[in-house]
Amino acid sequence: MEGFQRVAGLNEVAPGQSKVVKVNDKAIALFNVDGKFFAIHNLCPHEGGPLNEGRLKGYVVACPWHDLAFDIRSGQGTDGGGYCIGSYDVRVEGGDIFIGPRRKA
């Protein structure tokens, strides 16, 4: 899996939970939604709130500081403010989770 980096084991992120991982010195929020994994840049673009600590509802996470919300599948803001943060490809192989390069918006 060229360009992918192992970041966690499957047992490290329970369904409905998140974990901050590092990829190339960047903080990435890794989410588990019903056994499917998604990764986005961890810092909210508004004031740098830690998105991994936000409220996750379905595929949308809200910043814990000001409730700005993002779709964890794409990194697109859901509030109509034009915000978009980085999202990353995630692959599961065996019992390991890998994150690839940042997707283009």
Image (cartoon, helix red, strand yellow):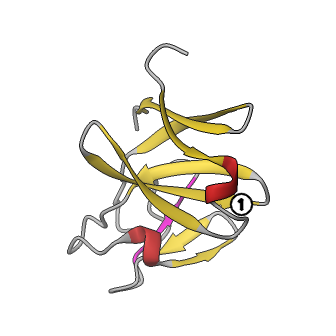
Identified at 34% across, 72% down, the residue is 50
Residue 66: image location, x then y, percent: 34, 86
Dot 1 crowding, Cα within 10 Å, few <14, some 14–19, many 20+: some
Identified at 70% across, 64% down, the residue is 14
**Does residue 45 show up magenta in the picture?**
no
Residue type (three-letter) at the residue carrying disc 1: Val
* SS of the residue under disc 1: strand
View extreme (top): residue: 2
- Left or right of residue 102: residue 89: right
Q: How many numbered circles does the render carry?
A: 1
Q: Quadrant of residue 25?
A: top left
Residue 88: image location, x then y, percent: 47, 39
101 w.r.t. 9: above or below: above
- Left or right of residue 12: residue 26: left
Residue 4: image location, x then y, percent: 48, 25
Identified at 44% across, 77% down, the residue is 53
The one nearer the camera, 11 or 25, is 11
The one nearer the camera, 85 or 17, is 17
Q: Which residues are magenta?
A: 68-72
The residue that disc 1 covers is: 33
Which secondary structure dominates the residues rendered in magenta? Answer: strand
Residue 26: image location, x then y, percent: 27, 47
